[in-house]
Image (cartoon, rainbow, N blue to C red):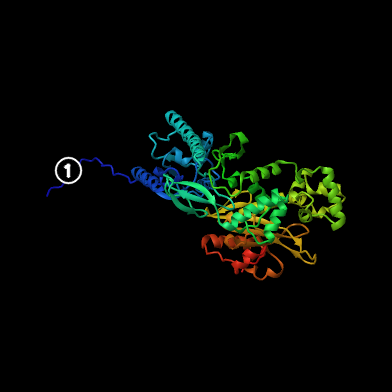
Amino acid sequence: MQDEPNTGIIQPVPIARAPIRAAQYVRVSTDLQQYSITNQMESIAAYAFSRNSTIVRSYADEGRSGLRLDDRPALTRLLNDVQSGVADFDVILVYDVSRWGRFQDIDESAYYEQICKRAGIKVIYCAETFENDDSLISALIKSLKRAMAGEYSRELSAKVFVGHCNLVRRGFWQGASPGYGLRRYLVGANGSPKGILAPGERKNIQSDRVILVPGPPDEIRIVRRVFNAFVKERKTYLQIARELNADGVTYIDDRPWNHVAVRHMLISEKYAGHNVYGRVSRKLNGTPKRNAPEAWIRTPNAFAPIVDQALLSAAIRLDQAPRISEMPVAEIVRRLKILLAKEGRLTCRIIDKASNLPISSLIRKRFGNMRAAYEMAGFHLPPVFDHHALRRSLRGKFTCFVAQIITELNAVGVSAVHWKWRTFLVSGSYFVAITVVRSTFHKTGKSPQWLLCNRGTCRSDYVVAIRTRKVDHEPMDYYLLPSVALPPKMIRLGGRTWRRLERYRHNTLATLVDAVKERVTEPAEPPSCADPSAAQAGDQYDLG
């Protein structure tokens, strides 16, 4: 075997290039099945394979509209990772321009892409016919595509609204909750009955329709009782609500009755069988707008009535007539003075119990605030009880508390970014709400107490409750509470429940930060209430 002659020419050796690290962002809304998450991921994977890229991160917004960033936690988390410098990828792969967003302002879509570009991370649209290479052609086509994506949403919104109006004119229900005493009934395209829909249930066949039918006999009797009490006995909304609560009658979802629920029932034409649509419109996630009555869509006698038309008309006339809420200011002040002489003081609770006065919320609107009403009636509220002024003075402190907790978490290696006013996102997966619990005194006046009101904090995964001192309003300690264990109304953070809540309490901010870090690195199943039945029966609960 002869050796090959040495020509003296060195043959080049091909150099293997390292794969490009990429993140993929996918989004799907409920109305576009062709853009399913699986289809997007398959197309992006094929594109990444052809471009020598490796997908190392995935961000998915399922069932999310592309109109606003606030409703898309995955895209928000992606942008936060890019801005904070923790992103370990070089490019972002998106199926097409519409998946990045259908923002009504195309500059908003460009702004979010510019955030990534400024951090050195390029956004690539895999299914588009143009290369996102900053050329003139790319910029023109991309701007056109963004405008088309936003226009699609506007056209779809108009088509959906017209479709809903046509169905209402045919007598079908297009609302969400049917209201107390009514039920949603599913019928086929030919009008064949199919059955009652339970709360939260939806139709599974597109051609099916929904109508309203009277509910259980007990609820029908309550509806007629409310109308008769208002029209014939001339009782106020508040009096009717109190009587129903005293008789053990619960509202929807076992909630207590209030004057708002009673008034809403008395002015709803659906109880006389009429289908009304379009009182309030909110298009493209914009601000809700109340429409004029002549713009409403009405279909009379669409459903089986619960009350007759004469009773409904009388209730609407009484609702629109001058009533106690329109009492002259001088008369309100006179009656407040009489109430002050009888009770010795004035509070919102005392005013709400008085049958000859408007409720405290209406008085607040008439006078601007409750302090002004008290002063005109001769009751001088001590400055310590001016809760509104105290809250305004503590807003700056609250902002400092939130910033301090976020800073401490980032310092120990836990990614924490501000999400909304009282909530921040930890490690891109957990939402933590912060609430400040100020000291108040028990009704006996002998001991301080801290009452945590659960107002929407259950939407987060955890709640950080900061107990403050009464003197300087500085933090005393911190509670890290799982939201699933919080009662629906109120929990006491002091007094007899101290021992039961001891395991959630942290004396310093450092121990709180360590506890948050432990929870997000090794998530555990949050504990539940010790006595769920008791949690439904009372206003104050203990975490067990």
Query: Is residue 108 at least partly visible in the picture?
Result: yes
Query: As drawn, is 293 to the left or to the right of 328?
Result: left
Residue 198 coordinates in the image, percent (x, y): 50, 55
Residue for badge 1: 5
Q: Is residue 381 left or right of residue 187?
A: right
- Residue lying at 53% horizontally and 35% vertically, measured from the top left: 104
Q: Which residue corresponds to the image point at 65% horizontal and 47% vertical from the top-left?
A: 266
Residue type at tag 1: Pro
Structural crowding at the residue carrying mark 1, measured as other residues with C-alpha within 10 Å and reported as few (<14), some (14–19) or many (≥20)? few
Residue 321 position by quadrant: top right
Q: Secondary structure at mark 1?
A: loop
In this view of the protein, which residue sits in the foreground, 371 or 242?
242
Q: Residue 413: image x %, image y %?
A: 55, 56
- Residue 40 falls in which quadrant of the image? top left
Q: Residue at x 32, y 45 (%)?
A: 15
Q: Quadrant of the C terminus?
A: bottom right
Image coords of residue 326 (percent x, y):
77, 43
